[in-house]
Image (spheres, rainbow, N blue to C red):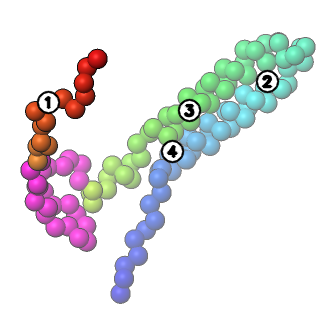
């Protein structure tokens, strides 16, 4: 009987929590900019507070994406370092013999003429 592996998501729960917080801060920043009552949104809300909230929201999103999930780091099925000649884990893990590189034939004269 075939064993079904659990689906692995790209991010962990903490990453998704941070992403939702970042989206909420971004939405608050855009809403704050629209609440400005000055002409053309040139008041404190439209020029200062809204963009600060947007910047904070984008920083939160950056950290949500870059934060390393604890599930991936604890997974021991993938090697953390690669060593030459070590077999790779998997169904078709057969060692491959390296082929030495061949040197191309170097022409005795250049293939172009100088003017």
CA gap, disc 1 to disc 4? Answer: 60 Å
| Residue range of the region highlighted in magenta in the rendering | 79-101
For the residues marked 4 and 2, what is the alpha-carbon distance in whole angstroms? Answer: 27 Å
CA gap between label 1 and label 3 equals 60 Å
Residue 57 horizontal/vertical position (percent): 62, 30
First in residue order: circle 1 vs circle 4? 4
Quarter assignment of residue 88: bottom left
Which quadrant of the structure image shows residue 8? bottom left
User: The C terminus lies in which quarter of the figure?
Assistant: top left
* For the residues bearing labels 1 and 3, Cβ distance under 8 angstroms: no
Which residue is labeled 3 in the image?
A: 60
At x 56%, y 40%, the residue is 18
Q: Nearer the viewer, residue 53 or 92?
A: 92
How many residues crowd around disc 2 within 10 Å: few (fewer than 14), some, or many (20 or more)? Answer: many
Label 4 crowd bin: few (<14), some (14–19), many (20+), radius 10 Å: many
Classify mark 3: helix, strand or loop.
Answer: helix
Is residue 92 depicted above or below 32 in this figure?
below
Disc 1 or 3, which lies upstream in sequence?
Answer: 3
The vertical placement of 79 against 103, above or below, is below
Mark 4 and mark 3: Cα distance apart in space = 10 Å
- Comparing labels 2 and 1, the label whose residue is closer to the camera: 1
x then y, percent, for residue 54: 66, 26
Q: Is residue 112 left or right of residue 99?
A: right
The reply to whether the C-beta atoms of the residues labelled 4 and 2 are less than 8 Å apart is no
Of residues 26 and 13, the one nearer the viewer is: 26
Q: Residue furthest bottom?
A: 1
Residue at disc 2, secondary structure: helix
Element carrying mark 4: helix
**Which residue position holds label 4?**
15
Label ID, residue 86: none
Tell me the tag on residue 33: 2
Q: Earlier in the sequence, mark 4 or mark 3?
A: 4
């Amino acid at each position: 009987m075939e064993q079904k592996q659990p689906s692995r998501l790209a991010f962990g729960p903490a990453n998704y929590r941070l992403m939702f917080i970042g989206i909420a801060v971004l939405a608050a920043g855009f809403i704050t900019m629209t609440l400005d009552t000055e002409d053309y949104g040139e008041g404190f809300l439209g020029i200062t507070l809204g963009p600060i909230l947007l910047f904070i929201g984008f920083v939160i999103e950056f950290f949500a994406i870059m934060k390393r999930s604890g599930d991936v780091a604890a997974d021991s099925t993938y090697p953390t370092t690669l060593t030459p000649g070590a077999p790779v884990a998997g169904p078709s893990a057969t060692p491959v013999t390296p082929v030495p590189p061949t040197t191309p034939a170097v022409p005795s004269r250049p293939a172009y003429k100088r003017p």
